[in-house]
Amino acid sequence: MQATIVEAVKDALHTEMAADDDVVVFGEDVAESGGVFRATDGLLEEFGEDRVVDTPLSEIAIVGAATGLAMYGYRPVAEIQFSGFLPPAFDQLVTNASRIRWRTRGALSAPMVVRMPYGAGVRALEHHSESMEGAYAHIPGLKVVAPSTPHDTKGLLLASIRDPDPVLFMEPKRIYRSFRDDVPEEDYEVPLGEAAVRREGSDLTVVSWGSMMPPTLDAADEADADVEVIDLRTISPMDTETVVESVKKTGRAVVVHEGPRSHGVGGDIVAHINDEALMYLEAPVERVTGFDTPVPLLSMEDYYFPHPPRILDAIEDALSV
Amino acid sequence: MSENEPTEHPANATVSAGEPRFLTQDDLSVDTHQVVAPDGSYDADEVPDLDDEQFQDLYRWMLTDRVFSKRMVNIQRRGELGTFGSTRGQEASIIGSAYTLQPDDWLYVGRAWTPMFMRGVPMKDMIMFWRGIEEGQQSFAEHNCQIAISIGSHLPLVAGLAWGMDLSGDDAIATAYLGDGATSTGAAHEAINFAGALEVPALFYCQNNQYAISLSAEEQTGANTLAQKALAYGMDAIRVDGQDVLAVYEAVNEARKRVRNGEPVFVESVTYRMDAHTTSDDPTRYRSDEEVDAWEDADPLERYREFLRAEGLWDDIDHDAIEAEIDAEFDAALEEANAFEERGVEEIFAHVYAELPPDLQRQSEEFSDLLERRPELYDYIEQRPKG
Amino acid sequence: MHRAIGDRTFADTAMDEATARDVFRDMVLAREFDERALSLQRRGWMPGYPPFKGQEGSQVGAAYAMTGDDWLFPTYRSNAMQLARGVPASDILLFRRGFAEYHSDHDVPVFPMAIPIASQIPHAVGAGMAMNYEGDDDAVVCYFGDGATSEGDFHEAANFAGVFDAPVVFFCENNNWAISLPREQQTASDSIAVKAEAYGFEGVQVDGNDPVAVYETVGDALEDARGGDPVLVESLTYRQGAHTTSDDPERYRPEDEDLPEWRTADPLDRFESYLREQDVVDDEFVEDCWADAEAELEAAIDEAEANSVPDPEDVFDHLYEDLPPRLQDQKAWLMEYLEDHDPQEMEF
């Protein structure tokens, strides 16, 4: 079937709720209203009010109760309405969800998913546009996933719900509905921790993920060179092998992400390239990122966002050395 | 009254005209449930329905709690433990409540160690926990319990565990032990409200031991009691004399029944932390000797002994022999804990995820390799099997 | 629950006639603002808007109980309060278009509107504590909704206020809906007001569609707060519109609410009838209010449009007092980049 990313989310939830009675979906406005982005639309009617639950406005309790349910044997899929509202629950991710397995030497675990739309570009109000994957990927014991296509969204979400560890599933809301692609009706998984090569090329490697994939691919198409584009798909654990092998082949690299430049995932990717492919490099690795500022209010978002010309600029810089 | 009568909707109260009338805690009267008075007197008709063996059992566990705390503080002073939080003074509060719990119930504690033993956890695992050895928590988990370190952070988990029990239709409840300080955390608030709104079988057992490290309960909140906080969640609460093991047992036993029926309950047990917050803390900096002495006089074991004597049960209890048995159990547990072998460096990496991701695998291997190449690194590494 | 309209003659209330006319005038302005904002949003002038229709009486009544130096901590839903306190409509409109909300550089004691639910409540208490340190006789009114009471921020802040005797009125507008969640699913407690018992201070319910009752109640509460006794006021009103223009309440809201008629009725009509009946306003005054409101909004929209000019330096300015070197580099890069690139090219 042809589906958008948000429809793929819904399809994955539907698929897994039908397959596994232990899957419970909850959060703010997910049941009666079907979610503010309609990602959970229809689940209440199909699976009933025990398994699709509107909760009070309590992010700490949403993430914490998901952890408790998971410890008890359920497969909770909790929704945080916007990524800007996860920070109050950061403590639950750090203190409990990510380390219950470790502190009990495997006697307990928290196989749970926290889904949330992330990123700028939908002209939303302040605090609705953050890309903080770098902060979350910094939590040992947590997995962080960011799909960029409807096909991957379904497969990655199914894999995330079935994963034995807690997964923060960051949905690129800027491209929630911007295109459709072929999403198989059947059950399938896209494994966590495996990047995808979206475009093969021999001159330069661009690494990105999530909502930055479309502008990255546009820039690659426009470049006067043979550009390889890698979609990381899982931020943590990261598939560094695919990145390193590609850079060994091309000798040049650009990393593109939406979150702030410093102390972020981009710097980590550059470090991996330095560790394992330094001698193959023919130019410094470029980063195209958001600035080290909050996401500007919507009138100025466009100055912040790495649009294709900025990516192209960096590609040309990397090729010019 | 206006022409628009309010409906039965709970959000619409009766209309009042004139000066605005404010709800105030001065209008609340919160009783403290008690069975045995501080002087040892009691009404025989009000004693909970337990048999002689159970009455003796309660004493044994209270004594276990006291001896365990004493021994742990001692070995800490000898340098055989990093730190420890003593429960002296809270024995009735801890044992009376935990005695009501069933094996399938979940228990997430702060400052209550003997309940783990009551559930079958070997004493050595508690010693190991305090020595910073994760196998302790592993053992607790096998008996449906955990210790929370971060204050209040476990309450949302308990709401989730209770939710799971509700969904499964299991004959069990999830219990959070918390302190007076935890009631001020946002996590506690969200979790208790959540449990109330979703009607899950959660029991919130708050031991008001008067101190959150150095902050007294009066400075913790403007509320006269912690029990009244339950009104904010539409939940029933009971305040109980935490120095009276029978009152605690009775209150929590009744609370547990209500919780099983889908009505979460909040219990405030009024007790006192006789010792320091942990062995690193010096309570003389923030509380007076007179205050401490007054609570010494409210010793829960002594009060219970009065009851046992009056019931004629004391003669069958050989206090010294029980104490010697507990001491021997502790000695054996300590020996076992001491025998715990040093762990390999790979243990740091184990159990971070179900399956070790490649990068982490690499970090583990590189570190092992480094240790092999530069054994002098071991000069900087002190495994602390004794905490 | 406290009420004036329908229960007492105007002379028996704590409000004087001049104040009543001002309150009415500002309720009309608020209604005009809300309606104009909705229609501006529909034609793409701004991306989204959270209407407050139905809550004007509650908000304006509360605002008028405040005195000159009292601070207001508002949210995205409390725009009638900001307007009544004197924040220019153009500032609020500019914020809706994605600009900082301090264009006019006004000196009204109002914080920026909070977006994440309940995040302003700890700040309000901190400001109250500061007033205690200063020895001021000022107080704080902290606005929030029924949903906010489930957040940890509310709890920690309210408890702080009780412990530190902060001069704060916690003004909870219970409009019965937190997006799609009705009040009775938000918490099992009998009322929001009763939550004050958890913090050892007083709570009170008021008919939020009765601006006179709200004025009286918040006025009393402010007096208590100045004396070191914080108060939780639950103002019972109703969100007549959607959560925001992106929301469709038909998906979750029953056609027949289990609420009394006064709760869901129009507070502006109710207040107008009361004031006419009590001979406080007449046709001419009411017509003037509407004409003035229309003119004021017209001017505010013009002002906002004239100032809707993005300045890329704003992305970096005011993040720190002194921009750190890395950010100076990033700013320089962007300014240079923009010299060679058409800013139009950067739009989505």
Image (tube, helix red, strand yellow):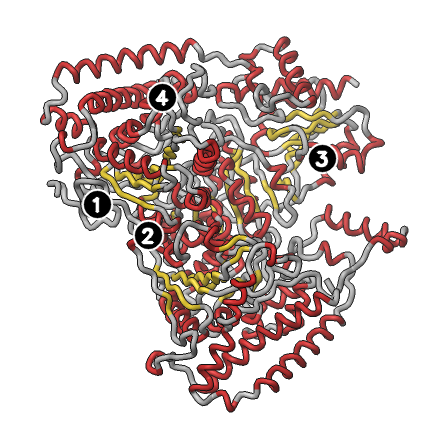
Disc 3 versus disc 1: distance between alpha carbons? 56 Å
Does the residue at mark 1 contact the one at mark 4 (Cβ under 8 Å)?
no
Give me the disc on residue A269: 3
Does the residue at mark 2 contact the one at mark 3 (Cβ under 8 Å)?
no
Q: Residues within 10 Å of mark 1 (few under 14, many from 20)?
A: few
Closer to viewer: mark 2 or mark 3: 2
Does the residue at mark 1 contact the one at mark 2 (Cβ under 8 Å)?
no
Disc 1 versus disc 4: distance between alpha carbons? 31 Å
Instruction: Name the residue beneath numbered marker 1.
Output: C258
| Residue A153 picture location, percent across and down | 54, 40
Instruction: Name the residue beneath numbered marker 2.
Output: B25
Q: Quadrant of residue C68?
A: top left
Name the amino acid type tagged 4: Gln
Badge 2 element: helix
For the point 63% across and 74% down, the residue is B122
Instruction: Name the residue beneath numbered marker 4.
Output: C41
Badge 1 element: loop
Disc 3 versus disc 4: distance between alpha carbons? 42 Å
Q: Residues within 10 Å of mark 2 (few under 14, many from 20)?
A: many
| Chain ID of residue with mark 3 | A
Q: Residues within 10 Å of mark 3 (few under 14, many from 20)?
A: many
Name the amino acid type tagged 1: Asp
Closer to viewer: mark 1 or mark 2: 2
Badge 4 element: helix
Disc 1 versus disc 2: distance between alpha carbons? 30 Å
Does the residue at mark 3 contact the one at mark 4 (Cβ under 8 Å)?
no
